[in-house]
Image (cartoon, rainbow, N blue to C red):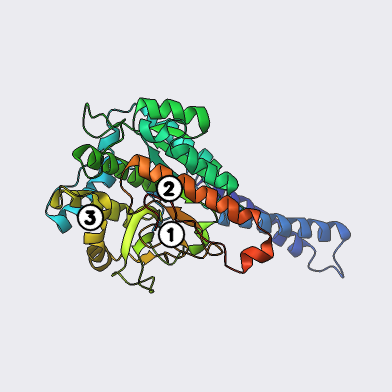
Amino acid sequence: MRVGRLATITSSSIISLAADMMATSKNSQSLSPLVVFLLGAASATVLLLFVLTATARPAWPALETGLQRSGEAPGSGSVRCSTPRANGTVAVAAEQHTGVRAPPANEAAASESDDDADEFARMLRRAAMEDRTVIMTSVNEAWAAPGSLLDSFLESFRVGENVSHFVKHIVVVAMDDGAFRRCQAVHPHCHLLRPEKEGLDLSGAKSYMTKDYLDLVWSKLRLQQRILELGYNLLFTDVDLAWFRNPLVHITMAADITTSSDFYFGNPDDLGNFPNTGFIYVKSTARNVRAMAYWHAARRRFPENHDQFVFNEIKRELADRMGVRIRFIDAATVSGFCQLGRDLNRIATVHMTCCVGLENKLFDLKRVIVDWKRYMARPLWERQMGKIGWTFEGGRCIH
């Protein structure tokens, strides 16, 4: 206000002075140099004061909305760390579709301290790829023991074709203290996940489809949702799986969820394919966070089944009700024992699917890695002929 008033007064005085000068020199043949100079200076001063007052802003900042204060543009689709309100929204969405109340997304981590949560977020930042994709696998003490599945899993990256760099992007989720200690001895990114149920022991070699086995496989699902909420894309891979080539080239960003297949029938968009969620890619979007909560809540409808069975049962609901686009990967490339790809020139990963028991899985996983080494040891021209395949003799599950 004061600046504007001062400018008005000053400019009026200067204009009046200039007019007086013009009047006094009215009868002169020409203006003197001094008058010309003063008139020019007065005009410049008036113009400058006018510009300053026209562009003047208040001395205090305008109030901003909470969204703007956080640096987030209105309508932003980015996914942030979960809050009680966000979790409530997810729970309501899941409840509307399933008829049951979805537990809060952070319930599994309720016993964790703030320091643990912060450390997990820092670990994700260290492990993430440039596009904010994190690879996750999970182990218990039996799977992480020396010479067990974790060692063979990591070995496959070393002997694979240009995949060794992916190891630094893997977060190994340990289901018990023994697995956590073993992970820390062999890998830089290890996270200890407490079981959802108090006192549950997840350390042993659980028999397939027993209650302890089901609790083990479901325990990781909420942590997967948490990764999405923190803004990271998730590539989950079971530990009984060998990486030989880059499987990410078979994942399209056009889909919300991309999953491997136990049985693949030729069309990647056909929901009739049978998924295997032991290798699944999920983009970090609000829709996928809701889908993950919906998936977990659906366990109550199928209480005696594992997460993959439930996903297969609800895949059409996810697509029709929630708009989730699910895409399936050809089993000839991201493969498994249920429908094994025979052309080693196309194979990216091999999963010990349709194989029950830790010892059987481990036996055949080691055998697959030996076959791959034999394949890679041959000259390129011989490999390209496509005549080098798997050796099935003596395998316990491979056929």
Q: Is residue 302 visible?
A: yes
Tell us which disc is closer to us: 1 or 2: 2
Picture quadrant of residue 259: bottom left
| Mark 2 crowdedness (10 Å alpha carbons): few <14, some 14-19, many ≥20 | many
Residue type highlighted by circle 2 = Asp
Q: Secondary structure at mark 3?
A: helix
Residue type highlighted by circle 1 = Ser
Q: Secondary structure at mark 1?
A: strand
Q: CA distance from mark 1 to mark 3?
A: 21 Å
Q: Secondary structure at mark 2?
A: helix
Query: Which residue is labeled 3 in the image?
Result: 310
Query: Which residue is labeled 1 in the image?
Result: 335
Identity of the residue furthest to the front in this view? 393
Return the residue nearer the eye: 175 or 81.
175
> What is the x, y in percent for residue 198?
21, 28
Q: Quick check: 351 above or below 168?
A: below
> What is the x, y in percent for residue 396?
37, 49
Q: Is residue 230 visible?
A: no
Task: Verify CB contact (< 8 Å) between mark 1 and mark 3.
Answer: no
Return the residue nearer the eye: 193 or 114.
193
| Mark 3 crowdedness (10 Å alpha carbons): few <14, some 14-19, many ≥20 | some
Tell us which disc is closer to us: 2 or 3: 2
Query: Which residue is labeled 2 in the image?
Result: 364
| Figure label count | 3
Q: CA distance from mark 1 to mark 2?
A: 14 Å
Task: Verify CB contact (< 8 Å) between mark 2 and mark 3.
Answer: no
